[in-house]
């Protein structure tokens, strides 16, 4: 790390001199330039490992410099001293009251990450610069090289599958199959044949041999998504497969050897399920060799700007449209909303904006469906842009009959589902039978209404 070259950019000579001296004191090479006259030539001539931008730069100016650096010297990290909303993945900030130890740690961390090609690749697919997301990316790089079983946890919509695919893509198995099994979407009576396959004649209608997902994943990676939905009898067979690396398909009298990296994902608390007797402890410990927890978006709101830019670029390219710029007023409202649907909800919202090319028009179209609603109980307030001066000021209290009915239906459905789950001890299949609706409908409502949290509160109250 001692040969790190830092290019200091600031139009104030006092700031340049101070930062140059400080960088040299902590042991790095420093070269300071004035942005207006020397920046471009110094960027190519000096070929720095990192750009250090002084506090006299404005946030908008920093963004413009970042665009230039990304075009001319892609992957070069930028450290900006100051506050502000920064929406570029190659920029990190340091508060104005930093000390030399803070600066040294920040420089070493950014340079180390930028020099790892795997980490740089992850930066383009898993968007986030918060400490939690940085650590997740470091763990992915490190764990992808081994075959250890990993349990990926997190709420729905946080990006668990994205993490699993990144682990596979950076692993020695990258050119082999990646097979995903959505345990919640498979009926219990079909789960075994889907996982392990069946022989011809194994049961009525088995006219030919069908390989299971484990066999298809041979030499590659298998992701067991929604692992908490696998019923207890099947958990025993799955444990045996994980321990012995072999299985027997339905109707077969021989065992099949399997070589597949196993990843599991869940939005449930498996530890609590083990305590409640709803998940086998031995399978839990076998899956949870190493764990990665993906935080909800409300716990990493600093990444919202980066995610918005990321999705806007994706959809502008996909739909052949100009890049939409979300105005600062609306962007600020994004940070006030709790995003119960996490990154998936934000992505869907940005997709709608990108298609219309007009965020205010999209807010008007959305009305009260989603984050543009005037009030979403328990999820924070995000006033809709373009709903008039009264709505923007928060003085609107009257609601349409449609809105009142919608809230009443939501409340009634939530109470009915929570009551059914309480009496069935969180057995969602039995709850669905009591409510006379499909199992899938119950799962969707639990996610939509955030019922899991309400159920836990009910248990605490006894």
Image (tube, rainbow, N blue to C red):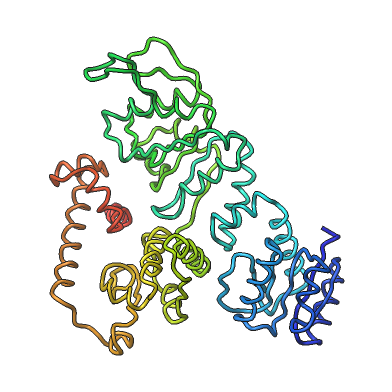
Which quadrant does the N terminus fall into? bottom right
Which of the pair 131/272 is nearer the observer?
131
Q: Is residue 212 above or below residue 79?
A: above
At x 41%, y 60%, the residue is 342
Which of the pair 368/270 is nearer the observer?
368
Q: How far across and down, in percent of the image, does residue 175 sit?
A: 57, 35
Q: How far across and down, in percent of the image, does residue 426 sit?
A: 27, 44
Which of the pair 233/162 is nearer the observer?
162
Q: Residue furthest bottom?
A: 389
Q: How far across and down, in percent of the image, does residue 67 sit?
A: 63, 71
Which of the pair 283/346 is nearer the observer?
346
Q: Is residue 170 left or right of residue 379?
A: right
At x 20%, y 52%, the residue is 417
Q: Is residue 258 left or right of residue 229?
A: right
Q: How far across and down, in percent of the image, does residue 291 sit?
A: 53, 44
Q: Is residue 99 above or below residue 76?
A: below
At x 36%, y 39%, the residue is 182
At x 28%, y 89%, the residue is 390
Q: Is residue 196 left or right of residue 97?
A: left
Instruction: Tally the numbered discs.
Output: 0
Task: Give the image quarter of residue 89.
Answer: bottom right
Q: Is residue 211 above or below residue 32?
A: above
Q: Residue furthest top?
A: 253
């Amino acid at each position: 790390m001692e040969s790190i070259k830092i290019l200091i950019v600031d139009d104030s000579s006092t700031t340049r001199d101070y930062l140059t001296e400080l960088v040299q004191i902590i042991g790095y090479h420093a070269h300071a330039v004035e942005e207006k006259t020397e920046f471009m030539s110094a960027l190519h001539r000096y070929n720095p490992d990192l750009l250090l931008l002084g506090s006299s730069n404005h946030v908008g100016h920093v963004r413009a410099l970042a665009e230039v650096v990304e075009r001319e010297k892609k992957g070069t990290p930028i450290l900006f001293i100051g506050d502000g909303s920064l929406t570029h993945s190659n920029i990190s900030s340091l508060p104005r009251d930093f000390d030399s130890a803070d600066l040294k740690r920040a420089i070493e961390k950014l340079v180390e990450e930028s020099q790892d090609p795997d980490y740089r690749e992850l930066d383009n697919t898993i968007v986030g610069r918060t400490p939690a997301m940085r650590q997740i990316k470091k763990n992915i790089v490190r764990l992808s090289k081994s075959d250890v079983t990993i349990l990926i946890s997190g709420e729905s919509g946080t990006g668990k599958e994205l993490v699993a695919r990144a682990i596979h893509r950076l692993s020695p198995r990258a050119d082999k199959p990646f097979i995903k099994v959505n345990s919640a979407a498979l009926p219990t009576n079909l789960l075994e044949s889907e996982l392990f396959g069946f022989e011809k004649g194994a049961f009525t209608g088995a006219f030919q041999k069908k390989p299971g997902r484990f066999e298809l994943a041979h030499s590659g990676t298998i992701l067991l998504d929604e692992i908490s939905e696998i019923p207890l009898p099947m958990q025993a067979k799955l444990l045996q497969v994980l321990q012995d690396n072999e299985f027997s398909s339905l109707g077969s009298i021989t065992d099949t050897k399997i070589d597949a990296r196993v990843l599991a994902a869940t939005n449930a608390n498996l530890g609590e399920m083990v305590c409640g007797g709803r998940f086998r402890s031995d399978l839990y410990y076998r899956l949870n060799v190493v764990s990665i927890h993906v935080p909800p978006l409300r716990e990493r709101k600093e990444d919202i700007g980066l995610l918005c830019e990321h999705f806007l670029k994706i959809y502008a390219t996909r739909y052949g449209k100009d890049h939409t710029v979300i105005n600062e007023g609306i962007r600020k409202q994004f940070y006030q909303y709790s995003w119960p649907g996490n990154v998936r909800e934000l992505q869907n919202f940005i997709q709608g904006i990108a298609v219309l090319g007009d965020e205010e028009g999209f807010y008007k179209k959305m009305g009260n469906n989603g984050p543009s609603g005037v009030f979403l109980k328990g999820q924070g307030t995000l006033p809709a842009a373009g709903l008039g001066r009264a709505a923007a000021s928060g003085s609107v209290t009257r609601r349409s009959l449609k809105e009142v009915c919608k809230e009443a239906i939501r409340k009634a459905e939530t109470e009915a589902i929570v009551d059914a789950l309480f009496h069935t001890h969180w057995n969602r299949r039995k709850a669905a039978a009591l409510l006379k609706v499909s199992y899938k409908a119950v799962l969707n409502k639990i996610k939509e209404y955030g019922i899991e949290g309400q159920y836990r509160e009910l248990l605490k109250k006894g």
